[in-house]
């Protein structure tokens, strides 16, 4: 049996796993599940996505800083997009959903711990 493509036992995660999954979308806090709940596939799924979002924020910052004038526009719209993705990730993780980031989820799957 499966739950949204994942084994059924993922559907019954603890509140701690949900909290750590939600915290994964707040910048450097994405390392918390790696340190505290490495055995939880749910928490690690969201930690990987949080790491990809953190990398995207850093790349956006570098890109915006190196391109004069247009960099401000790139930063503005890129920040809105990444903020919305982070917010949706927090909501989905807190509700126990194994949500995959659009556009960036494929990169998260490639991260190995």
Image (cartoon, rainbow, N blue to C red):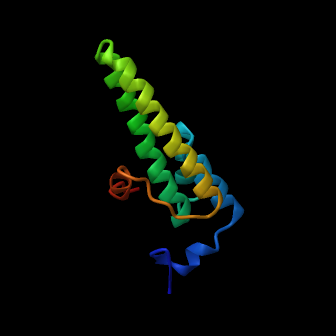
Q: Write the residue at 43% across / 53% down.
A: 101
Query: Can you give x and y, in whole percent of width and height, for residue 53 in the image?
Result: 44, 42
**Picture residue at 39% right of the left edge, 38% below the top:** 55
Q: List the single residue furthest toward the top.
A: 68
Q: In the displayed structure, would residue 73 be above or below residue 111?
A: above
Left/right of residue 40 with respect to residue 5 in the rendered view = right
Does residue 75 appear in this view?
A: yes
| 105 or 77, nearer to the observer | 77
Which residue is farthest bottom?
A: 1
Q: Nearer the viewer, residue 97 or 24?
A: 97
How far across and down, in percent of the image, does residue 85 sit? 49, 45
Quadrant of the image for the C terminus?
Answer: bottom left
Question: In this view of the protein, can residue 32 be seen by the observer?
Answer: no
Residue 88's spot in the image, x, y percent?
55, 49
Q: Residue at x 51, y 66 (%)?
A: 41
Q: Position of residue 9 (x, y in %)?
A: 57, 78
Q: Is residue 61 left or right of residue 29?
A: left
How many marks on residues?
0
**Outermost residue to the left:** 67
Q: Is residue 82 above or below residue 41?
A: above
């Amino acid at each position: 049996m499966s739950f949204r493509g994942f084994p059924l036992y993922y559907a019954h995660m603890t509140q701690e796993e949900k909290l750590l999954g939600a915290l994964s979308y707040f910048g450097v806090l994405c390392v918390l599940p790696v340190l505290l709940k490495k055995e939880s596939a749910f928490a690690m799924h969201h930690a990987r996505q949080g790491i990809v979002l953190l990398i995207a924020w850093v790349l956006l910052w570098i890109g915006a800083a190196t391109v004069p004038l247009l960099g401000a526009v790139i930063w503005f719209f890129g920040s809105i997009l990444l903020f919305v993705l982070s917010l949706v990730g927090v909501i989905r993780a807190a509700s126990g959903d194994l949500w995959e980031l659009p556009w960036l989820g494929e990169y998260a799957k490639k991260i190995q711990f």
